[in-house]
Every structure is written in C-alpha cells, then in structure tokens.
Image (cartoon, rainbow, N blue to C red):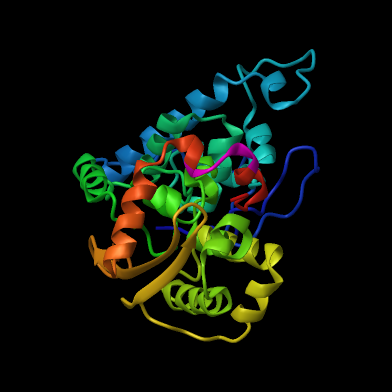
Amino acid sequence: MRTMASERGGVRAGAGTSAPARGTVPAGDHGPSVPAGGHRGRVPSGDDVRRQELAEFLRSRRERITPEQVGLVRGRRRRTPGLRREEVAQLSAVGVTWYTWLEQARDIQVSSQVLDALARALLLDRTERRHLFSLAGAVDPSPGADCPSVTPALREMLRQLDPVPACVQNSRYDILAYNRTYGRLFCDLDAVAPEDRNCMLLVYTNPQWRAAVVDLPRTARLMAAKFRMSMAEHLAEPAWKALLARLEAASPEFRENWARHEVVGPGDRTKVFRNARVGLLRVDHTDLWLGPSSGPRMVTYTPADDETRRRLERLQALEPAEAWSPAEAAAGVSSR
C-alpha cells in the first residue's frame, strides 16, 4: 500500500501552488487511466471495493454541503454542487492532491486524525462518522465513540452491581460506561461532558474528583506512571497524543509528574475516598479485563468493610438533587 509522505502537505485552497511532497503526484497529473482503486485486467479485491465505497461516500457528503454552512462565500461562478474538493481540503487542513486521491479511490493510507478532521469538515453525524471510519478500516479516536466492548449485557451487569461502584474503561482511561453509584462516587459524572470523562483529566483538573481522593499527590503521581506505561504501545496514535498534550497544557502538576518518567503496571489494592455526601469509603479496587490487557476493562470498587457497604447503599439511594446540587457541581465542592 502506497503511503503519502505527508497527508497534511500539498496544495491548499487559497494558498496558491507549491511543489508537492516527495512521493506525491502534482494535482492534475493522475497518471495512466485505470479503473478507480484498481488496475487494468484485474478483478477488484475487497480493498478495491472498500476504497471505491469510501470515495463515493466522501463525494456524496461533500456535494450536499453548501458553502454557507461552513462559513465560505459562494461566489457567482460556482458550478460544483456543494463544496469543491479544495474547500474540503482547506477545512480539514489536508493536501488537495491527497484528498483528491481519496475521492479517486487511490491506494493510500489515511490516519484516524485526518479522518476525524474530514468528519468535522463534512458535518457528519454520529452514524455517518462511524461509517466513514469503518470504510477506512480505522479506529475512531473520539472518546465519545461507541465502544463495541460495551454491550447491552455488560451495561446490565454494571447496573446489577449497584451499589458496588463499577465502570468500563479503556487503556487510555476513558470512562466508557458506568453504573449509578460510580457516577456519584467522585463527582457528578453525568454532568461531565462525554469527551471529558477520562480518569487522567479528572484526577488532574476536576475539583470534585480531586477532593474525593484522600491521598491526592500520591494518586496523581501513580496515575501518571500508569498512563506512561499504557502509552508505550500507543505512542504514535493521535488520540493518545492529543490527551497527553491536553494534560500538559492544563496541569503543572501533571507536567512535573510526567517528567519523572516513572512507570507502574496495573494492580489491585485498597483505596480510600471521601465522598461529599456519605463520608469516607474504603474499597478494594479490581480490574476485570474484557480482552487483552491493553484493551478495555471493568473497574470495580467493592466495599472493604461493613460501614463502607452501608455508605455505598446510601449513596446509591440518594435522589439526583441530593447527590449533587447544581451549585456544588459548578463549584466542585460540598456545602455540607
């Protein structure tokens, strides 16, 4: 499979022309005429068919969007229905030639990062976005994307575990699903935007979450070490790099811990939390892996003593307004 030297290189709309990156073909020079995605005399393979379907899907989505929808001026001489290719390339910050090749079903690689940019530029809804990544054979890096590991049966298991706090996380510490008690354990998790439901972000930036952790400095340092260990297998992946950049920008404490280059593997141990409504909780942390150790896992916090069990039962039974008031949720603290 031919790989472009740079998906984000090439000519951009409104920027004039420039020499294409090494290994690219100048815009307009498409070589000999061959069937899209294939070669003369060859029966199309499954990959050829998939690339052709991707090309047609991109073209159909491009043609349905008006310039006004994306803040562009239509102009009087426009004949193209919807957006032009160079306009999609400009909105996605990718090369015009490279995007043209995508719509020609060329045999090129496309990263999750660029697919994400194309999905945003083409105003794809959730179903269309999932279809785009499926056609490209890529994994959607968005934390809010559906996780095939979180089945209806697994959600029901989470529900039945109440009042034992439980959630499903991936190796990047995104919280993919959780039960009622877990949603109240550290903060009002329902009030947190799905893209922000990440344990690394929460332990370093969310006041409610941080207030619930009894030994915050040690826990934050341990989390950074675990994150570094997990990231070793994902160093080049856009979603991981984006999360790391966000943490470094948001938290001096994280930058200090990250600079230690400490690594710690996953492990089970007793933890102590301070819930704003029911007080101290001693729980035994357990990871139940749903596949390879680098994939998703169910995290459970079983009560370590009878008092904790009773307090967790009270926490589960609280009405939403009792668990967290709007003012407390905004301030990140409890008034009681």
Question: Residue 5 is drawn in which quadrant?
Answer: bottom right
The secondary structure that most of the magenta stretch takes on is: helix
Residue 176 shows in this picture: no
The residue under the point 19% across, 43% down is 153
Looking at the picture, how far across and down is residue 236, in whole percent? 50, 67
Left or right: where 78 falls relative to 161: right
Image spot of residue 116 (x, y percent): 53, 45
Quarter of the figure that contains the N terminus = bottom left
Q: Is residue 326 magenta?
A: yes
Give whichever of 284, 127 is nearer the camera.
284
Percent x, y of residue 90:
69, 39
Residue 173 in percent (x, y) is at 44, 62
Quadrant of the rendered image containing residue 241: bottom right
Q: Nearer the viewer, residue 194 or 91?
A: 194
Q: Is residue 76 above or below residue 251?
A: above
Q: Residue at x 57, y 31 (%)?
A: 122
Q: Is residue 56 left or right of residue 304?
A: right
Q: Which residues are magenta?
A: 323-327
Q: Is residue 263 visible?
A: yes
From the viewer's side, name the closer residue of 277 and 98. 277
Which residue lies at the image location 56% right of the left edge and 29% below the top edge? 123
Magenta residue check for 261: no
